[in-house]
């Protein structure tokens, strides 16, 4: 079984988690830029975070045979903090990087005018950079939040097939599905969505547009939720093809819209050896091993 | 600096020309022609997107070629490094011996040596570090290779710099003792470097270290 967790904050997880995820079948992850559980106070703090999503975290993931990509954005919560909003001006230089496969997480937290501005600006950045957008739907006042999110998407330059609406549940899935966007479900211990409810939603609305993620982070969460949903789908009569569609092919199709998805972890491993990467290098570039 | 502005793009090495797909080859030819105009925002975009245009197996080489074609200053290299992904940083580190004659870019090497990313450590210990890194930091870098499993065969000028280095020998012996006391194996590479520190051993032949400061024949 091959699994792709399309939304997980590995920065907050240990190598034990990587090991367990690999053993459970996780071969690829996307780590969306989000908030850290406590406020940042400057642009520089974001830039260090983006550097880690583009350097250290893919390196850690590769040690466990997992392909790591990320999405880059100013998150909705910190879009309200004037100490953080200048990071919007820094995003273009990150959005051209090779392993950035979407703009995200963007969306609404408290549905403020500052969040309206940041969401519209970042949907436009996604269009400008040929990237899809990962749009988080708010946890409070969810149904109204979804409607306002869909309005923002309709007013943007992005078509619905280039938008993934995340953290959906029973109350928001129908309207989200009708919009034509991809449907993301975060399966958590206790809150949001659990495995049983997830499988019921898949039965009611079909696997065609659905992506399932663990959204595991620094809070109470479980990085193996993708596997647990896959197991329950099979136990409840879904086919292996359905499981592969929801937990592999759909995330590959969505993030593949970036043209930057590179799932060959072996190639990552090969670059660990300094003297392999210089094969075919120009005359005068000695392999690192040469003395 | 002796280079005259090249009127055409840097020719691709034959192996690379053969391995790239036609669109990748066209992209790289174009990127090298643009880079010949110097370090522009377009050049920096080409460095960022090399893997998705050329394929990851060729991205390092493509980035190194683009950097060499653009003749960046140490300030340009510092900007590309600090704004770059790990892959871009690696390309900058590999390019240093060909682009920077003096020690101005040492802070980049030292930054890479502070990381725990073995790809960066490996790239940092090329001919530029061999030429310019202080004895103290170089010895710590060798120990860090032993700690992190970076093969010392990848360290440029290892034999020349280790030869007769009594302080390095002491550090290696202490590390071996610590490992042995913990009941853990001593890495094979430690014995290899320790042997090189022996002042009685035949000194290594002077070796070419990567083509001189600019890596260019002209
Ligand atoms: Zn999240």
Image: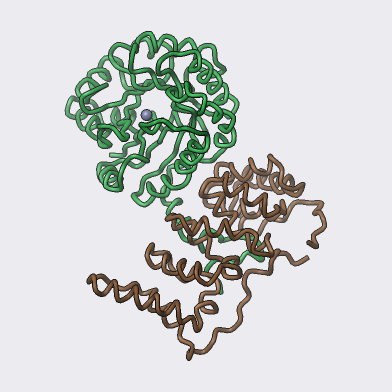
Q: In which quarter of the image is residue A22?
A: top left
| Colour scheme | by chain
How many numbered discs sit on the rendered protein? Answer: 0
Residue beneath the point at 35% across and 31% down: A37
Q: Where is residue A223 in the image (x, y as percent from the top left)?
A: 28, 36
Q: Quadrant of the image for the C terminus of chain B?
A: bottom right
Please indicate, yes or no, whether residue B66 appears anywhere in the rendered image: no
Q: In which quarter of the image is residue B92?
A: bottom right
Visual hue assigned to chain A: green
Q: Position of residue A263 (x, y in %)?
A: 43, 42
Asked whether, in this view, residue A281 is left or right of residue A60, the answer is right
Which of the pair A61/A266 is nearer the observer?
A61
In the current view of this chain or complex, which residue is farthest to the left?
Answer: A235
Q: Quadrant of the image for the N terminus of chain B?
A: bottom right
Which of the pair B168/B153 is nearer the observer?
B168
Residue beneath the point at 40% across and 43% down: A67
Q: Position of residue A149 (x, y in %)?
A: 44, 14
Residue beneath the point at 56% across and 67% down: B133
Please indicate, yes or no, whether residue A189 appears anywhere in the rendered image: yes
Residue B202 vertical placement versus A150 (above, below) = below
Residue A181 vertical placement versus A240 (above, below) = above
Quadrant containing ligand 1: top left
Q: Which chain is brown?
A: B
Q: Position of residue B130 (x, y in %)?
A: 57, 70
């Amino acid at each position: 079984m091959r699994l792709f967790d399309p939304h997980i904050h590995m920065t907050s997880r240990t190598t034990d988690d990587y090991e367990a995820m690999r053993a459970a079948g996780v071969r690829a992850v996307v780590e969306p830029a989000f908030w850290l559980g406590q406020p940042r106070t400057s642009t520089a703090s974001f830039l260090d975070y983006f550097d880690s999503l583009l350097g250290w975290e893919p390196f850690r993931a590769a040690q466990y045979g997992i392909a790591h990509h990320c999405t880059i954005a100013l998150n909705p919560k910190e879009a309200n903090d004037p100490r953080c909003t200048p990071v919007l001006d820094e995003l273009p230089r990150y959005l051209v990087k090779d392993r950035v496969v979407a703009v995200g997480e963007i969306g609404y937290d408290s549905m403020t005018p500052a969040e309206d501005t940041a969401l519209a600006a970042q949907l436009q950045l996604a269009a400008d950079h040929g990237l899809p957008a990962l749009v988080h739907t708010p946890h409070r006042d969810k149904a109204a939040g979804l409607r306002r999110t869909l309005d923002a998407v309709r007013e943007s330059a992005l078509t619905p097939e280039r938008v993934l609406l995340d953290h959906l549940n029973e109350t928001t899935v129908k309207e989200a599905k009708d919009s034509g966007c991809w449907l993301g479900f975060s399966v958590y211990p206790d809150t949001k969505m659990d495995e049983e409810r997830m499988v019921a939603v898949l039965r009611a609305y079909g696997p065609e547009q659905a992506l399932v993620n663990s959204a595991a982070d620094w809070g109470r969460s479980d990085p193996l939720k993708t596997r647990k949903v896959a197991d329950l789908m099979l136990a409840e009569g879904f086919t292996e093809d359905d499981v592969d569609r929801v937990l592999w092919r759909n995330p590959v199709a969505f993030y593949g819209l970036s043209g930057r998805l590179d799932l060959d972890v072996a190639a990552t491993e090969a670059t660990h050896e300094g003297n392999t990467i210089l094969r075919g290098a120009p005359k005068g570039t000695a392999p690192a091993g040469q003395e | 600096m002796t280079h005259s502005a090249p009127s055409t793009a840097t020719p691709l090495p034959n192996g690379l020309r053969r391995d790239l797909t036609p669109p990748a080859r066209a992209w790289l030819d174009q990127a090298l022609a643009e880079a010949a105009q110097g370090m522009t925002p377009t050049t920096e975009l080409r460095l960022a997107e090399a893997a998705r245009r050329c394929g990851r197996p060729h991205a390092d080489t493509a980035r190194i070629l683009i950097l060499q074609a653009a003749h960046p200053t140490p300030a340009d290299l510092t900007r590309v490094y600090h704004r770059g992904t790990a892959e871009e940083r690696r390309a900058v580190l590999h390019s240093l011996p060909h682009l920077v004659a003096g020690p101005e870019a040492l802070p980049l090497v030292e930054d890479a040596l502070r990381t725990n990313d073995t790809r960066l450590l490996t790239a940092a210990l090329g001919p530029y570090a061999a030429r310019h890194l202080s004895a103290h930091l170089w010895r710590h870098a060798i120990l860090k290779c032993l700690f992190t499993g970076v093969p010392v065969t990848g360290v440029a000028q290892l034999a020349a710099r280790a030869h007769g280095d009594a302080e390095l020998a002491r550090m290696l012996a202490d590390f071996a003792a610590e490992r042995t006391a913990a009941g853990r194996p001593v890495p094979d590479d430690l014995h290899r470097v320790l042997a090189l520190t022996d002042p009685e051993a035949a000194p290594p032949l002077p070796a070419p270290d990567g083509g001189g400061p600019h890596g260019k024949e002209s």
